Amino acid sequence: MSLYKGRDWTCKEYLDMMKEVFTLEFRLRSFKISNLFWPLLFAVVFIPRIGGWIKHWQAEGNQVAKDLTAISLDFKEVSFPEDRSRSSILIFWATWCGPCKIELDRFKKSVRSGAIDGGRIYAISLDEPTLAVKQFQEKSKYPFHILSDPKGKMRRQFHIPGTPTVFHIDKEGKIVWASSGISPTGIFRAKAHLDESS
């Protein structure tokens, strides 16, 4: 049979050629599945977070402004953290953010179990009306300070890349650790951070 101009293939040659094509295709498929898994995972999970990591690295060690203010659920402007002689944790979040709810629920569970002091945790909702935050808190009942930053001034002040973002603040008022997204070690780090100045 003639497949290409000027080339006559015998049946055996044709079958051998097809066998090589299928073998090569199988090898390519195997290569795609096994050898590209980790690079693809890295590209999908880690590359989008690089910008946030750079911002966190820049934030760590910087002095936190002494006049941090937000809106309480009583619609009053409040200054925080209340006790600046001890370390604290700031969580920047939003009511519509699924990962934020997971992270806040983890903190809620740790506070309720007594592992973490809820009085030193400040969860600040960004760019949302205070009334929406209050209604969300009435359902969720988080056992720590829930505040609102409806104009998102802290997002700009701290260059927050996304929510949830967690800052650990030491007793000198410096950011000593920052993370965006769900952190597998976040609760353990929070406990260790708060225990340091207990």
Image (tube, rainbow, N blue to C red):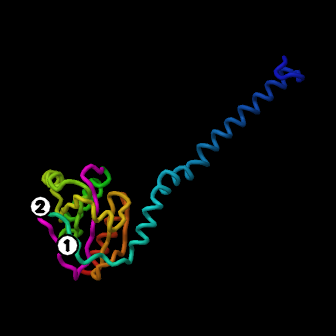
- Residue at numbered disc 2: 75
Extreme residue in the top direction: 1
Question: Percent from the top left, x then y, of residue 52?
Answer: 42, 62
Q: Taking 17 as reference, is 97 left or right?
A: left
Mark 2 closeness class: few <14, some 14–19, many ≥20 residues within 10 Å: few
Real-space Cα distance between discs 2 and 1? 15 Å
Give the residue type that dot 1 points to: Phe
Residue drawn at the location 27% of the way across and 49% of the way down = 96
Q: Nearer the viewer, residue 168 or 14?
A: 168
State the SS at label 1: loop
Q: Taking 163 as reference, is 55 left or right?
A: right
- Residue at numbered disc 1: 80
Question: Percent from the top left, x then y, of residue 63?
Answer: 33, 78
Residue 144 visible somewhere in the drawing: no
Residue drawn at the location 48% of the way across and 61% of the way down = 50
Chain part drawn in magenta: 76-97
**Quarter of the image that includes the N terminus:** top right
